[in-house]
Protein backbone atom coordinates (compact mmCIF):
# COMPACT_ATOMS: atom_id res chain seq x y z
CA UNK A 1 0.00 0.00 0.00
CA UNK A 2 1.21 3.46 -0.86
CA UNK A 3 -1.97 5.41 -0.30
CA UNK A 4 0.05 8.53 0.32
CA UNK A 5 1.46 8.51 -3.22
CA UNK A 6 -1.86 7.65 -4.89
CA UNK A 7 -3.37 10.62 -3.13
CA UNK A 8 -0.40 12.80 -3.96
CA UNK A 9 -0.79 11.98 -7.66
CA UNK A 10 -4.49 12.89 -7.57
CA UNK A 11 -3.74 16.05 -5.56
CA UNK A 12 -1.26 17.21 -8.19
CA UNK A 13 -3.54 16.16 -11.03
CA UNK A 14 -6.42 18.15 -9.56
CA UNK A 15 -4.46 21.34 -9.01
CA UNK A 16 -1.95 21.49 -11.86
CA UNK A 17 -2.96 21.73 -15.53
CA UNK A 18 0.57 20.61 -16.54
CA UNK A 19 0.17 17.36 -14.61
CA UNK A 20 -3.22 16.82 -16.29
CA UNK A 21 -1.56 17.29 -19.65
CA UNK A 22 1.08 14.71 -18.77
CA UNK A 23 -1.64 12.37 -17.51
CA UNK A 24 -3.25 12.55 -20.95
CA UNK A 25 -0.06 12.48 -23.05
CA UNK A 26 2.49 10.32 -21.18
CA UNK A 27 0.79 8.40 -18.40
CA UNK A 28 3.54 5.77 -17.99
CA UNK A 29 6.21 8.37 -17.37
CA UNK A 30 3.98 10.21 -14.93
CA UNK A 31 3.07 7.08 -12.95
CA UNK A 32 6.74 6.12 -12.72
CA UNK A 33 7.36 9.20 -10.60
CA UNK A 34 5.19 7.90 -7.77
CA UNK A 35 5.71 4.85 -5.57
CA UNK A 36 2.65 2.90 -6.65
CA UNK A 37 1.82 -0.79 -6.46
CA UNK A 38 0.58 -2.55 -9.59
CA UNK A 39 -2.95 -2.51 -8.21
CA UNK A 40 -2.73 1.23 -7.59
CA UNK A 41 -1.38 1.87 -11.09
CA UNK A 42 -4.23 -0.13 -12.58
CA UNK A 43 -6.82 1.72 -10.50
CA UNK A 44 -5.49 5.07 -11.70
CA UNK A 45 -5.23 3.95 -15.33
CA UNK A 46 -8.66 2.40 -15.85
CA UNK A 47 -9.81 4.30 -13.73
CA UNK A 48 -11.35 2.08 -11.06
CA UNK A 49 -12.99 4.73 -8.89
CA UNK A 50 -14.49 2.10 -6.57
CA UNK A 51 -11.12 0.50 -5.92
CA UNK A 52 -9.49 3.87 -5.26
CA UNK A 53 -12.23 4.57 -2.71
CA UNK A 54 -11.73 1.18 -1.04
CA UNK A 55 -7.96 1.77 -0.97
CA UNK A 56 -8.73 4.82 1.17
CA UNK A 57 -8.38 7.74 -1.23
CA UNK A 58 -10.08 10.79 0.28
CA UNK A 59 -13.30 11.76 -1.49
CA UNK A 60 -12.18 15.37 -1.68
CA UNK A 61 -9.44 14.18 -4.02
CA UNK A 62 -11.35 11.36 -5.67
CA UNK A 63 -14.46 13.30 -6.70
CA UNK A 64 -12.40 15.67 -8.86
CA UNK A 65 -10.48 12.80 -10.47
CA UNK A 66 -13.81 11.08 -11.19
CA UNK A 67 -15.17 14.29 -12.73
CA UNK A 68 -12.03 14.62 -14.84
CA UNK A 69 -12.67 11.11 -16.14
CA UNK A 70 -16.24 11.96 -17.05
CA UNK A 71 -18.18 10.66 -14.07
CA UNK A 72 -21.36 12.60 -13.35
CA UNK A 73 -22.16 13.07 -9.66
CA UNK A 74 -24.53 10.11 -9.28
CA UNK A 75 -22.21 7.84 -11.28
CA UNK A 76 -19.35 8.83 -8.95
CA UNK A 77 -21.36 7.91 -5.84
CA UNK A 78 -22.45 4.63 -7.42
CA UNK A 79 -18.87 3.76 -8.43
CA UNK A 80 -17.80 3.98 -4.77
CA UNK A 81 -20.70 1.79 -3.67
CA UNK A 82 -19.87 -0.73 -6.40
CA UNK A 83 -16.27 -0.69 -5.19
CA UNK A 84 -17.35 -1.63 -1.66
CA UNK A 85 -19.50 -4.47 -2.99
CA UNK A 86 -16.69 -5.79 -5.15
CA UNK A 87 -13.61 -5.24 -2.98
CA UNK A 88 -15.05 -5.04 0.54
CA UNK A 89 -14.79 -2.33 3.17
CA UNK A 90 -12.43 0.63 2.99
CA UNK A 91 -8.93 -0.61 3.82
CA UNK A 92 -7.11 2.50 5.01
CA UNK A 93 -7.31 6.23 5.50
CA UNK A 94 -9.92 8.45 7.06
CA UNK A 95 -12.96 6.36 6.15
CA UNK A 96 -11.62 3.11 7.52
CA UNK A 97 -12.66 4.05 11.04
CA UNK A 98 -16.29 4.12 9.94
CA UNK A 99 -16.14 0.51 8.80
CA UNK A 100 -18.18 -0.27 5.73
CA UNK A 101 -21.44 1.30 6.84
CA UNK B 1 -12.46 48.32 17.56
CA UNK B 2 -11.97 47.26 14.00
CA UNK B 3 -13.76 43.94 13.75
CA UNK B 4 -16.94 45.20 12.10
CA UNK B 5 -18.69 42.06 10.94
CA UNK B 6 -18.75 38.34 11.77
CA UNK B 7 -20.80 35.58 10.23
CA UNK B 8 -20.76 31.90 9.34
CA UNK B 9 -22.08 30.08 6.31
CA UNK B 10 -21.84 26.79 4.46
CA UNK B 11 -19.60 26.29 1.43
CA UNK B 12 -20.45 22.89 -0.07
CA UNK B 13 -19.76 22.69 -3.81
CA UNK B 14 -23.27 21.39 -4.51
CA UNK B 15 -24.66 24.77 -3.40
CA UNK B 16 -23.64 26.14 -6.78
CA UNK B 17 -22.65 23.04 -8.75
CA UNK B 18 -25.84 21.04 -8.19
CA UNK B 19 -28.19 24.00 -7.71
CA UNK B 20 -30.75 22.78 -10.23
CA UNK B 21 -31.22 19.47 -8.43
CA UNK B 22 -32.31 20.92 -5.08
CA UNK B 23 -35.85 21.51 -3.85
CA UNK B 24 -36.31 25.00 -5.29
CA UNK B 25 -38.32 26.46 -2.40
CA UNK B 26 -35.76 25.49 0.27
CA UNK B 27 -32.81 26.40 -1.95
CA UNK B 28 -34.22 29.82 -2.74
CA UNK B 29 -34.81 30.62 0.94
CA UNK B 30 -31.18 29.64 1.59
CA UNK B 31 -29.99 31.84 -1.28
CA UNK B 32 -32.19 34.70 -0.03
CA UNK B 33 -30.47 34.54 3.35
CA UNK B 34 -27.05 34.54 1.73
CA UNK B 35 -28.21 37.61 -0.19
CA UNK B 36 -29.34 39.19 3.08
CA UNK B 37 -25.89 38.43 4.51
CA UNK B 38 -24.30 40.07 1.48
CA UNK B 39 -26.30 43.21 2.24
CA UNK B 40 -25.21 43.19 5.88
CA UNK B 41 -21.59 42.68 4.87
CA UNK B 42 -21.73 45.61 2.45
CA UNK B 43 -23.40 47.80 5.06
CA UNK B 44 -20.46 47.08 7.42
CA UNK B 45 -18.14 48.67 4.79
CA UNK B 46 -15.25 46.27 5.37
CA UNK B 47 -11.82 47.12 3.97
CA UNK B 48 -10.82 43.47 4.09
CA UNK B 49 -12.61 40.15 4.49
CA UNK B 50 -10.96 37.37 6.48
CA UNK B 51 -12.37 34.00 5.40
CA UNK B 52 -11.75 31.21 7.90
CA UNK B 53 -12.06 28.15 5.71
CA UNK B 54 -11.38 24.44 5.64
CA UNK B 55 -9.93 23.73 2.23
CA UNK B 56 -9.94 20.34 0.61
CA UNK B 57 -6.44 19.54 -0.69
CA UNK B 58 -6.26 22.48 -3.07
CA UNK B 59 -3.07 23.99 -1.64
CA UNK B 60 -2.16 21.91 1.36
CA UNK B 61 -1.32 18.23 1.37
CA UNK B 62 0.16 15.67 3.70
CA UNK B 63 3.67 16.43 2.44
CA UNK B 64 3.70 19.62 4.51
CA UNK B 65 0.36 20.20 6.20
CA UNK B 66 -0.08 23.35 8.28
CA UNK B 67 -2.71 23.29 11.02
CA UNK B 68 -3.27 27.01 10.51
CA UNK B 69 -2.25 29.04 7.50
CA UNK B 70 -2.94 32.67 6.61
CA UNK B 71 -2.73 34.10 3.11
CA UNK B 72 -0.24 36.84 2.39
CA UNK B 73 -0.67 37.18 -1.36
CA UNK B 74 -1.26 40.20 -3.60
CA UNK B 75 -4.03 38.27 -5.27
CA UNK B 76 -5.61 34.85 -5.37
CA UNK B 77 -7.21 32.77 -8.09
CA UNK B 78 -10.23 30.52 -7.92
CA UNK B 79 -11.96 28.25 -8.21
CA UNK B 80 -9.28 25.59 -8.57
CA UNK B 81 -12.01 23.13 -9.54
CA UNK B 82 -13.48 22.72 -13.00
CA UNK B 83 -15.60 25.83 -13.64
CA UNK B 84 -18.55 23.88 -14.97
CA UNK B 85 -18.44 21.37 -12.13
CA UNK B 86 -18.68 24.16 -9.56
CA UNK B 87 -20.69 26.53 -11.78
CA UNK B 88 -18.45 29.43 -10.75
CA UNK B 89 -16.22 31.18 -13.28
CA UNK B 90 -12.50 31.35 -12.57
CA UNK B 91 -11.42 34.78 -11.52
CA UNK B 92 -8.76 36.77 -9.69
CA UNK B 93 -9.52 37.95 -6.16
CA UNK B 94 -7.57 40.83 -4.61
CA UNK B 95 -5.57 40.15 -1.45
CA UNK B 96 -4.49 42.53 1.32
CA UNK B 97 -0.83 41.59 1.86
CA UNK B 98 0.25 44.58 3.90
CA UNK B 99 -2.68 44.33 6.33
CA UNK B 100 -2.33 40.56 6.42
CA UNK B 101 1.32 40.89 7.40
CA UNK B 102 0.43 43.16 10.32
CA UNK B 103 -2.28 40.75 11.48
CA UNK B 104 0.04 37.76 11.19
CA UNK B 105 2.81 39.46 13.16
CA UNK B 106 0.33 40.22 15.97
CA UNK B 107 -1.27 36.78 15.93
CA UNK B 108 2.13 35.13 16.11
CA UNK B 109 2.45 36.57 19.61
CA UNK B 110 -0.23 34.09 20.65
CA UNK B 111 -0.36 31.23 18.14
CA UNK B 112 1.91 29.46 15.69
CA UNK B 113 0.91 30.17 12.11
CA UNK B 114 2.05 29.24 8.67
CA UNK B 115 1.62 31.81 5.93
CA UNK B 116 1.47 31.58 2.17
CA UNK B 117 1.98 34.05 -0.66
CA UNK B 118 0.48 31.61 -3.13
CA UNK B 119 -3.01 30.22 -2.78
CA UNK B 120 -5.66 28.89 -5.11
CA UNK B 121 -9.16 29.10 -3.69
CA UNK B 122 -11.34 26.01 -3.82
CA UNK B 123 -15.10 25.82 -3.28
CA UNK B 124 -14.52 26.33 0.45
CA UNK B 125 -13.85 30.01 -0.20
CA UNK B 126 -15.30 30.51 -3.69
CA UNK B 127 -18.86 29.46 -2.85
CA UNK B 128 -19.15 32.01 0.00
CA UNK B 129 -17.50 34.75 -2.12
CA UNK B 130 -19.80 33.97 -5.05
CA UNK B 131 -22.75 34.94 -2.85
CA UNK B 132 -21.26 37.49 -0.47
CA UNK B 133 -18.86 39.52 -2.62
CA UNK B 134 -20.09 38.61 -6.11
CA UNK B 135 -18.03 41.37 -7.75
CA UNK B 136 -14.91 40.10 -5.94
CA UNK B 137 -14.15 43.68 -5.00
CA UNK B 138 -13.37 43.23 -1.29
CA UNK B 139 -9.73 42.29 -0.56
CA UNK B 140 -9.63 38.83 0.99
CA UNK B 141 -7.31 37.36 3.62
CA UNK B 142 -7.79 33.58 3.54
CA UNK B 143 -7.23 31.46 6.62
CA UNK B 144 -7.09 27.71 6.45
CA UNK B 145 -7.65 25.33 9.31
CA UNK B 146 -6.67 21.78 8.45
CA UNK B 147 -9.92 19.85 8.86
CA UNK B 148 -9.12 17.18 6.25
CA UNK B 149 -5.92 15.30 6.99
CA UNK B 150 -5.48 14.10 10.60
CA UNK B 151 -3.76 14.67 12.96
CA UNK B 152 -5.99 17.74 13.29
CA UNK B 153 -5.50 20.82 15.44
CA UNK B 154 -7.33 20.53 18.80
CA UNK B 155 -10.53 22.57 19.15
CA UNK B 156 -9.07 24.65 21.98
CA UNK B 157 -6.30 25.76 19.64
CA UNK B 158 -8.92 26.84 17.08
CA UNK B 159 -10.55 28.96 19.77
CA UNK B 160 -7.15 30.41 20.70
CA UNK B 161 -6.53 31.22 17.06
CA UNK B 162 -9.88 33.03 16.90
CA UNK B 163 -8.99 35.06 19.97
CA UNK B 164 -5.60 35.93 18.50
CA UNK B 165 -7.29 37.03 15.28
CA UNK B 166 -9.67 39.23 17.23
CA UNK B 167 -6.88 40.83 19.24
CA UNK B 168 -4.96 41.52 16.03
CA UNK B 169 -8.03 42.96 14.28
CA UNK B 170 -8.71 45.27 17.19
CA UNK B 171 -5.16 46.61 17.02
CA UNK B 172 -5.32 47.80 13.41
CA UNK B 173 -7.30 50.79 12.13
CA UNK B 174 -8.86 48.99 9.16
CA UNK B 175 -12.47 47.81 9.19
CA UNK B 176 -12.31 44.02 9.04
CA UNK B 177 -15.03 41.46 8.39
CA UNK B 178 -14.64 37.80 9.30
CA UNK B 179 -16.56 34.90 7.82
CA UNK B 180 -16.20 31.33 8.98
CA UNK B 181 -17.23 28.71 6.48
CA UNK B 182 -17.65 25.04 7.08
CA UNK B 183 -20.13 22.25 7.29
CA UNK B 184 -21.55 20.83 10.48
CA UNK B 185 -22.49 17.14 10.13
CA UNK B 186 -21.86 15.84 6.63
CA UNK B 187 -20.23 13.00 4.74
CA UNK B 188 -19.11 14.81 1.60
CA UNK B 189 -17.76 13.05 -1.48
CA UNK B 190 -18.41 9.59 0.01
CA UNK B 191 -21.16 7.03 -0.61
CA UNK B 192 -22.97 8.62 2.36
CA UNK B 193 -23.06 12.01 0.65
CA UNK B 194 -26.44 13.59 1.40
CA UNK B 195 -26.67 12.15 4.91
CA UNK B 196 -27.15 14.96 7.46
CA UNK B 197 -27.60 14.62 11.23
CA UNK B 198 -29.99 17.51 11.77
CA UNK B 199 -30.36 16.99 15.53
CA UNK B 200 -26.59 17.05 15.98
CA UNK B 201 -26.33 20.15 13.83
CA UNK B 202 -29.01 22.00 15.78
CA UNK B 203 -27.42 21.09 19.12
CA UNK B 204 -24.06 22.34 17.86
CA UNK B 205 -25.57 25.55 16.48
CA UNK B 206 -27.23 26.30 19.80
CA UNK B 207 -23.87 26.14 21.58
CA UNK B 208 -22.22 28.10 18.79
CA UNK B 209 -24.84 30.86 18.79
CA UNK B 210 -24.64 31.16 22.59
CA UNK B 211 -20.84 31.22 22.47
CA UNK B 212 -20.62 28.45 25.05
CA UNK B 213 -16.88 27.95 25.06
CA UNK B 214 -16.64 24.94 27.37
CA UNK B 215 -19.40 23.03 25.63
CA UNK B 216 -17.95 23.73 22.20
CA UNK B 217 -14.49 22.63 23.26
CA UNK B 218 -15.89 19.44 24.82
CA UNK B 219 -16.55 17.85 21.43
CA UNK B 220 -14.12 15.06 20.58
CA UNK B 221 -13.14 14.00 17.08
CA UNK B 222 -14.17 10.42 17.84
CA UNK B 223 -17.70 11.51 18.69
CA UNK B 224 -17.81 14.00 15.84
CA UNK B 225 -16.72 11.36 13.35
CA UNK B 226 -19.32 8.92 14.60
CA UNK B 227 -22.24 11.36 14.72
CA UNK B 228 -21.31 13.95 12.13
CA UNK B 229 -18.96 12.26 9.68
CA UNK B 230 -15.52 13.35 8.55
CA UNK B 231 -17.13 16.58 7.34
CA UNK B 232 -17.98 17.36 10.95
CA UNK B 233 -14.32 18.10 11.60
CA UNK B 234 -15.05 21.43 9.92
CA UNK B 235 -16.73 22.67 13.11
CA UNK B 236 -13.22 23.98 13.73
CA UNK B 237 -14.02 27.00 11.54
CA UNK B 238 -17.13 27.80 13.61
CA UNK B 239 -15.17 27.39 16.85
CA UNK B 240 -12.44 29.73 15.62
CA UNK B 241 -15.14 32.31 14.91
CA UNK B 242 -16.55 31.81 18.40
CA UNK B 243 -13.10 32.56 19.81
CA UNK B 244 -13.01 35.66 17.62
CA UNK B 245 -16.42 36.86 18.86
CA UNK B 246 -16.14 35.80 22.50
CA UNK B 247 -19.10 37.09 24.51
CA UNK B 248 -21.26 37.75 21.44
CA UNK B 249 -24.56 36.03 20.88
CA UNK B 250 -25.30 34.97 17.33
CA UNK B 251 -28.46 34.91 15.25
CA UNK B 252 -29.39 31.94 13.09
CA UNK B 253 -30.78 33.30 9.85
CA UNK B 254 -31.17 29.98 8.09
CA UNK B 255 -30.64 26.29 8.65
CA UNK B 256 -32.04 23.43 6.59
CA UNK B 257 -30.64 20.12 5.43
CA UNK B 258 -30.41 20.11 1.63
CA UNK B 259 -29.28 16.55 0.80
CA UNK B 260 -28.19 17.19 -2.80
CA UNK B 261 -25.92 19.93 -1.41
CA UNK B 262 -24.63 17.28 1.03
CA UNK B 263 -24.83 19.56 4.06
CA UNK B 264 -27.19 21.29 6.49
CA UNK B 265 -27.13 24.70 4.86
CA UNK B 266 -26.43 27.40 7.41
CA UNK B 267 -26.37 31.19 7.53
CA UNK B 268 -25.57 32.76 10.91
CA UNK B 269 -24.76 36.34 11.82
CA UNK B 270 -22.78 37.26 14.94
CA UNK B 271 -23.29 40.88 16.00
CA UNK B 272 -19.90 42.00 17.25
CA UNK B 273 -19.71 43.28 20.82
CA UNK B 274 -16.51 44.65 22.39
CA UNK B 275 -14.39 42.16 24.32
CA UNK B 276 -14.74 42.40 28.07
CA UNK B 277 -11.04 42.18 28.86
Image (cartoon, coloured by chain):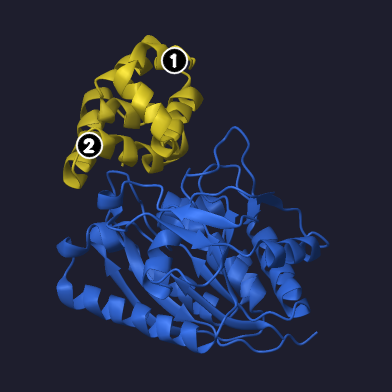
Residue A36 is tagged as: 1
SS at circle 1? loop
Q: Residue at x 76, y 53 (%)?
A: B112
Quarter of the rendering occupied by the N terminus of chain B? bottom right
Between B226 and A29, the one nearer to me in the picture: A29
Q: Earlier in the sequence, mark 1 or mark 2?
A: 1
In this rendering, does residue B145 appear at all? yes
Residue ID for mark 2: A81
Residue B189 is tagged as: none
State whether residue A99 is above or below residue B259: above
Between A32 and B268, the one nearer to me in the picture: A32
Q: Residue at x 26, y 31 (%)?
A: A84
Q: CA distance from mark 1 to mark 2?
A: 24 Å
Q: Position of residue A2 (x, y in %)?
A: 48, 20
Q: Residue at x 23, y 73 (%)?
A: B27
Farthest right residue in view: B109
Q: Colour of chain B?
A: blue
Q: Residue at x 68, y 51 (%)?
A: B115
Task: Say few, some or many: other residues with alpha carbon within 10 Å of mark 1 (under 14 / 14 to 19 / 20 or more).
Answer: some
Q: Chain of mark 1?
A: A
Quarter of the rendering occupied by the C terminus of chain B? bottom right
Q: Colour of chain A?
A: yellow
Side (left or right) of B109 relative to B113? right
Amino acid sequence: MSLYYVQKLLYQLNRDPNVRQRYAASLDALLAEYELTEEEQRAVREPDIGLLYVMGVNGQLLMHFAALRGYEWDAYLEAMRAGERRYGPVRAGLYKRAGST
Amino acid sequence: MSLVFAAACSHAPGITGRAQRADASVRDRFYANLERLRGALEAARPQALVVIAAEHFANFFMNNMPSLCVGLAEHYEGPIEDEEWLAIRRTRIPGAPELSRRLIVEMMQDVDLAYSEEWKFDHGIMVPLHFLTPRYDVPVIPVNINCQGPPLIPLARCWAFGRALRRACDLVPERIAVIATGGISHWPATPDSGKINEAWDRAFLEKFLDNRREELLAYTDTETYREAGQGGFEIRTFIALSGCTEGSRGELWFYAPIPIFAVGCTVAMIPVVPLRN
